[in-house]
Image (cartoon, grey):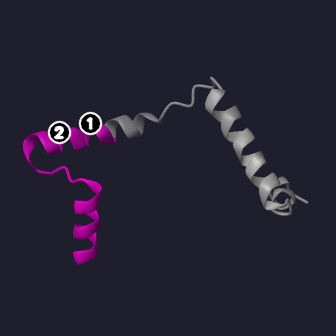
Amino acid sequence: MSVEELAMQLPRLEMLRLMESQWVDLSQAGDGGDSPALHEVALRETERRVSSGEEEVLDWEQAKRRLRRS
């Protein structure tokens, strides 16, 4: 049986405790979990489009309204 299958059999409270302990471990790990270079390229391209007026910045509520209309 896989670890995932075993975890899914835990009572809900124990599953939440397991998730919390994993999150704490991952957030404290200094394993160089930096974003891939591709993310930086995408962010720079977005910044360029915003600066040139090709793209506009929307807050979340505006974005949801726009998405719902399309």
Residue at 86% across / 63% down in the picture? 9
Q: Position of residue 7 (x, y in %)?
A: 82, 56
Q: Which residues are magenta?
A: 42-70
In the rendered structure, are the residues bearing label 1 and label 2 in contact, judged by CB atoms less than 8 Å apart? yes
- The N terminus is located in which quarter? bottom right
Give the residue pinned by disc 2.
48
Q: Is residue 56 left or right of residue 6?
A: left
Spatial CA distance of label 1 from label 2 is 6 Å
Q: Callout 2: helix, strand or loop? A: helix
**Residue 66, placed above or below residue 23:** below
Residue 65 is a magenta residue: yes
- The C terminus is located in which quarter? bottom left
- Residue 38 visible, this orientation: yes
Q: What number is the disc on residue 44? A: 1
Residue 23 falls in which quadrant of the image?
top right
The residue closer to the viewer here, 67 or 48, is 67
Residue 10 falls in which quadrant of the image?
bottom right
Q: Position of residue 36 (x, y in %)?
A: 47, 36
| Residue at the outermost top position | 30
| Residue at the outermost right position | 1
| Residue at the outermost front position | 13
Residue 14 is a magenta residue: no
Q: Callout 1: helix, strand or loop? A: helix
Q: Is residue 37 left or right of residue 67?
A: right
- Residue 70 visible, this orientation: no
Q: Pointer 2: residues within 10 angstroms few (<14), some, or many (20+)?
A: few
Amino acid type of disc 1? Arg
Residue at 17% across / 39% down in the picture? 48
Magenta stretch mostly in which secondary structure?
helix
Q: Is residue 47 left or right of residue 26?
A: left
| Residue at the outermost left position | 53
Residue at 24% across / 53% down in the picture? 59
